[in-house]
Structure formats: structure tokens, C-alpha cells
Image: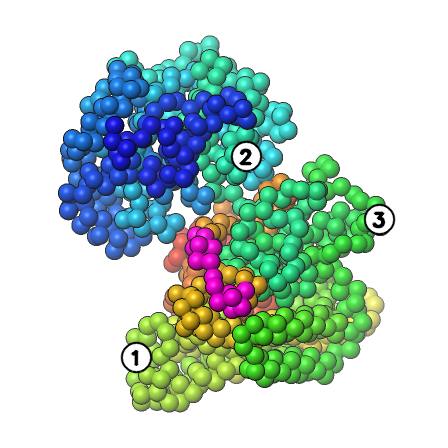
Amino acid sequence: MSQRHVLDLREVDETRGALVGGKAARLGALAGLTTSPGMPGVHVPEGFCVTTEAFRDAVADAPAVRELIGRLAHVAPDDHDTIRTLGARLRQTIEEIPVPEDIATAIAHALRRHGAEAAFAVRSSATAEDLPTASFAGQQDTYLNVVGAAEVLRHVSRCWASLFTERAVSYRRRHGIEDGAVRMAVVVQRMVFPDAAGVLFTADPVTGNRKVATVDAGFGLGEALVSGLVNPDVYRVRDGEVVARSIAVKERAVRAVPGGGTREVTVDEGHREQTAVTDAQVVRLVELGRRIEAHFGAPQDIEWCLVGDAFHIVQSRPITTLFPVPDPVPDPGPGSGSGSGSGSGSGDQGNRVYVSVGHGQMMTDAMKPLGLSMWRLTAMVPMHEAGGRLFVDVTPRLASPASRAGLLDVLGRGDPLVRDALETVLAQDGFVPTPPEAASSSGADSEAARGAAPVAEAATVTVADPAIVAELIARSEASVAALEREVRTKSGPALFDFLLEAFEEHKRVVGDPLNIRAIMAGMEATWWLNDHLREWLGETNAADTLTLSAPDNITSEMGLALLDVADVIRPHPSVVEFLRQVGDGDFLDELAKSAGGPESRDAIEAYLDRYGMRCVGEIDITRPRWRERPDTLVPVILDNVRNFEPGAAARRFEEGRRRALAKEQEVLSRLRELPDGERKSEETKRMIDQVRAFIGYREYPKYGIVSRYFVYKQALMEEAARLVGAGVLGDAEDVFHLTFEEFHDAVRSQRVDERLIARRKEAFRSYRSLTPPRVLTSDGEALSGAYRRDDVLPGALVGLPVSAGTVEGRARVVLDLARADLEAGDILVTAFTDPSWSPVFVAVAGLVTEVGGLMTHGAVIAREYGLPAVVGVEGATRLIRDGQRIRVHGADGYVELLT
């Protein structure tokens, strides 16, 4: 038997995935464990593998295959018709290729060894299959009850061809895997004729809970379940006990046909409501699954067959859709932020509850390791990394009755979904134990939990003194200027030592008590006005209008300033035409050659001097800044040129100021008419003055943080360039996949681990496809919360009302700021909006986001610009079609789909 083309299943293991594909490698590993004392009861049907070398040799003399794969590589991911057409031609071409004689001989020899007249299952096993980051479940083909050598050969060819089904090609595109990089092996195993079959998930695939296993079971072959022909019996098992079961009425089953093939059969009426397996068998199966999970080191999706009372495993692959569990002990040191995200959450820390940092920061995308470690090093509290995101541990405050109510109140005001998710956890008896009071006052607070502490302190800022904000801005500017001066004198290892000191200054500025009190003064005044004016006047979200055009709002100023840039460019048609042709990269020098180009370039340069440190996802230092990629702003500038008249920025600001003043006068006048009206009016006037003095400053600390980040990044990228120049790195941006401490070590040693960087890149690609939950437990349960409302129109999408008003218009679903194409009256629908989206806000009539809270940046700026806005709308970018007509109810918190 040719070792290049055919290997017995017991000759392969996980190290030979490139030769036999993922499925076969894992089955081979399990087959090798059947005699292990630690793996009693693991039965894998015997068989062999047709290797990827056989596939390569079979298509080597078929230039049509290479030509079609080359054409497929240039097809856009959303061009489904072309993918379908080319895929069909590839499959037909491969199936028509005769299996080379030496390969056919090797397969025939293997069949004789395992019983030439026996029935076999023929399963595809691609090299990209069953990866830790992409399982490829159901993407290639499996054929059951194949009898005879000729039929086995025919189905081997069909498995090879299934590499190019439309679903397989599309799946590879979603996971960034090139078609030409994948090879197909085939597993041929003795057929098992089960009484029952199904799937075991060693972690709950819906909630993510690692301590709950789910078993689906049905009569006959598992194909009936996989194809959706029948509903399965479903069992949930925890701690060796069936905790829930749902027994289906099973009218159909799939059985093997003598002589080959399968067919649907009708289940006898008397058996339809019988269980396919007993509780004892389910518990035993889960115990088996736990051993397999322990061997592979990750939760598994296991296909099984039951013959008599013996379980046979026919597939085990990782569950790739689970969000990773944070390590219970954060690493606060320089080496934090490894990017692995694979912490088990186990250990002696007890049950833990984590809240997402990204949802509070309006940036839920995965971050690269350097970004994660830099944020952790500059954060005020310990953070835990999982799945390329950061979380804070709220367990101490959540566990203590003394702090729980305050925590839930503060987080709930910002994002009701976070509160609902935490209350769901609290409703699970015993998960969050109540500790002795002494314990609740010790230990590190989370960044989210700390939000409760400054509320009481905010009351000390009772005078609406603009000098307080001016002083804080001056302090921040002086600190950034000092950083810029000092960092220029540092390089090599000394730079990293200096930056560690700079991070402490960074935290001192952010944690300045006056800074926190000023932020909370604006937020507290907003809450006070909304609560009291609702009670006294029946006004909903009155602060939305009262805060229009508030002073010192750096983020709203940023959006208006780009209107001023458009005013400079608009009179110059050649500049406008030039900008329409701009591609990626820096275009400013070339721009200056156009008529009107010098003044246009100067206007853009001045804007970048003030705001060039910003970008989408700016909390991740690895993201390209506007100063690094000024072309990102071009679509927004062109929209402003097209949609606005000269002087729009000043007019909009003045209009907002007048509306706020008129609202203030109206509210105070109505209050004076009430019983005890003078007192109520005076209290309200003080809070209006307070909110207008401080709410704009709410945006400044983030601007200061990002300003410092850009200084850090510029210095670090100079070091990365030196590593490239020394031949240590191939690309400067490879340092993005190192932590800060690893980067420091590379500069000291002039060495990097290229394999580590490659692993980190692969992990980052996988994390990008995951959706982070708002709340995550140490059991792996992912919770996103629910609004639990029954006061919205049927079919409407529910969210959080953050900026009052109702607007109807065309939805523009925009996932990339650089691809924005907006008209006046459009409603922006996107995943999240951090401050970098503010320039787009001036051009739209309303806002809908999937992530956000009452005081997050998008909500603050929507109120500042008077845009009706609903945030926290789960699945908005998926449920709302681009171009669809919608109506946003900003005061009531829902979105109507009109067409």
C-alpha cells in the first residue's frame, strides 16, 4: 500500500493534518486512544485515509482545475452566482478525472484489509477542516453505506469535488482561507449501523456554558438529524445529571439499504414518542465526551452512533463559535494582553462575572495583542482578555449587597442590556455568593464597577464654573506636550522604560479627582434633569434639547470642523474631482498641485493637526490614525461638499444654542406655574447651568487619551522600523501581534519568534468573527441582555432611546467609515460609533447602532447635533437592509421597518 496515497487510520494523529486533513487527523488521534487506560469506551470505526498527496497527484495533470481555481480567487465574496457557476464546473471537472491507477490500487488494497465486501462510510477531510478557529461543519460531503471498490473510488472523487461546493467556498471566504491553499483527503471507515445516532456538544452551543453539555439524539443514522429531516430528542446534562430533556415525536428515520445507500423510513407509530437513548446512556456519553474534550483541550462537537449499548465516535471537532473564557487572574504587568484569549476560567477563584469593556467604549471589534496590552497598561483597573477583547471583573461589587444596587443603577443607566444580563446571572441561585461584608470592601474593582464610586463625589461640583473645564483641558494639553518633548529623546530599550513611566502619568491624568468630578457633574445633571422633568412636567429626555451646542465638546467640534474644511474645498472643482479619484494612502502632496490645492491641503493639514490622532476603533493603538491614512476622511469631505452650503458649521452650532436656550426658558416658565414652582425652577436652572458647563467636557478625556496614544504609537513604530532595517522583522506591523513587553524584549535581544507572530495572526483572524457578549461568566455563559418591553409596534426593532425625536428616511448600513456614501436625510445604521464617527453625524438625519448606552460617545454627539437616535439594537446591521425606509423613534427607543 502506497504510504504517500493511503494510510491506515491508526497510523495518523493530529500532527499529520497536512497529509490527511483535519477530520482524519482527529479521528486517527481518537483511534489511537481506544487502547489507552485513560480512554475507556472510545470506539472509532476502523478504516483508512486517502491522503492529500493522492488528491494533488490526481489533479496534477488537469490544467482546467488550476485555471478555474485561479478564476475563482478573483471573484468577489458576494458574487454568489459566479461562485456557484465556477464551483459547479470545478466539481464536474474533478469528478470526471479518472483516479490514477497507483492510487486506485492502493485504495483497493486497503479495502481488502478492512473487508472488501463490507459497507463503508466515505467522508471528506480537508486541510482547513476542524481548525481551532473554523470547524467547516457540513461544508464538504459525506457518503454512507458505500459498497464495492468501484463505488468507493467514485465517492472518493465526489469528496474531492466537494471542496468546491458553493457553501464550502463561501465559508472559506468568511474565514480568510484561500481556495488554492486547501487540499482534500478522504476518510474511508467501516460502516456502523446504529440503533440511534446524534451529536454531543460538550459545551452549550447556545449559551456558551462550559459546564452544560447538550445531546441531540434520534433513531437510525445521524443523517436524519443533520439534514433536518426530524427533530431530535434533546438532553442537557450538568454535573453528571440530566437537568432538562425534550422528547420529540420522531416520525421518520434514515436507515442503510442492503447493497448500498440509504433511505428514509417511517418509524413505527408505537415508537415515535419513545426516547432514542436512556438517561443513563446520555450521562455515559457526556462522560465520554468530557474525556475527549480533555484530550483535545477545547469543547467538542462530537458525532456518535449507538450500537447495542456501545458508543462509536465518527467525528470530533472543536466548537468554534464559543466565545473564549477570560483567565480569572488578570496580568497587570507589562507582559499582559497575550492575545491568546484561551483562559479556561477555572482555578480557585470561584465563580466570576465579567462586563465587556468594548461595549462601554463603543468598540467591540477584536484588538491585536499590542493594542490589548497597551490598553491594559494604561487602564485604571485590572482587565481580563478573551477573544481579542477586554473585560472587567464586577464580581466583588455584584456579590456585596452594599454595592450591588449602585453598580446595577450606574451600569443600567448607561446600558439597560448590561443590567438585565447581570440580573439574569444574579437570578441563578448561588452563582454569585454573598460574601462577608469585609470581603466586599476589598479586592480590585472593575472599570465598570468603579463608575458607581464617583457618583457621590460629583455632588461636590455644584458651581457651573467654566474655569474648571478650562483648567482640566490646560492640564491635559500640558501633559501631552511634555510627553511629546521627552519621548523624542528616547530610543531602544530606554524608550520602553520611559513609556512605562509615561503610562503612570497617563493614569494620573485620567484619575485626577477633579477630572472625574467634572465628568460626573455633567452626567449627574443629565440624569437629574431627565428624572425630575419627567416627574414634574411629563417631559421625556428633556436634557437632549437642553444640551444642544454645549461648549467645550471636542467631539462635536471635530464634526463641525470638517464642514469648514469642505467650505475651503467647495469652490475648487479641480480639487473636488481630484478627491473623487483618491485611492489608499497619503494624497496631500499631490493635492497641492491642483488649482486651489494649496489652500485645500492646508485646511486638511490643519484639521489633521487637531484631530489626526483619531480613527475608528481608536482605543486599539494598532489601528491606522487619520494622520496615517488621511484618505479615510475623503468620502466624508465629499459628502459635506455635496450636501451643505457654506457656513453650515457656524449655523448649525448657533441653531442648537438657540434651541437649547428656548427649551430652557420654556421649561423654567412651566415649572413656575406648578405648586412650589419657584423652588423647582431655581433647582432646575442650577442643573441646566451645570449640565451645560460640564456635559461637553465628557468627551475631552477620551481625546486626551487618544492624543497620548498617538505619541506612544509614533515612537513605537520608529522602533519597529529599526527592527525591519536590522532584518529582525519582515514588516513593521508584525509588532502589532506582540505585547508591549514582548516588543520590548525584541528590541533588547534583536530577535522575534516568527512562529508566535504567525499564531497570533491566525488567532486574530478567528477572533474577528466572534461577537463579544456584554456579560460573560467564568462558566463561559455569554449574556447580551434583553429589553423585556411590550409597548412597541409589532415587528419593530427595540433599542435604547438616547436622543429624542422621530425621523423617517433611507437607512444607510455603513460598516466602514471610509466607504460612507451619505445623502441629506439618510439614517445611519452601523455596529457602533466611537468619536471618529462624529464627522458623519453632521450629514445624517438619525442614528441606529447595535452597541451603545445613554452616555456613550455616539449618544452624546447625537444629542449634541439633535439627531433622533436609538442604540443597542441587536442585529441592526443584519435586520435592516441598506436602502430600506425606516422610522426612528428616538424618545421611545424603537425602529420601524417601513419597506
Q: Residue at x 46, y 18 (%)?
A: 306
Q: CA distance from mark 1 to mark 3?
A: 68 Å
Mark closer to the observer (1, 2):
2
The amino acid type of the residue labelled 2 equals Ala
Q: CA distance from mark 1 to mark 2?
A: 61 Å
Residue 369 in the image, given as x and y percentages of width and height: 52, 59
Give the residue number, with chain letter if any, for mark 2.
294
Instruction: Determine the secondary structure under disc 3.
Output: helix
Give the residue number, with chain letter if any, for mark 3.
437
Mark closer to the observer (2, 3):
2
Q: Is residue 893 visible?
A: no
Q: Is residue 506 above or below residue 3?
A: below
The amino acid type of the residue labelled 3 equals Glu
Residue 838 in the image, given as x and y percentages of width and height: 51, 71
Q: Residue at x 40, y 54 (%)?
A: 881
364 in the magenta segment: no
- First in sequence: mark 1 vs mark 3: 3
Mark closer to the observer (1, 3):
3
Instruction: Determine the secondary structure under disc 1.
Output: helix
Span highlighted in magenta in the image? 745-762
Q: Is residue 567 visible?
A: yes
Residue 561 in the image, given as x and y percentages of width and height: 50, 80
Q: Residue furthest front?
A: 749
760 in the magenta segment: yes
Say whether marks 1 and 3 touch (CB < 8 Å). Answer: no
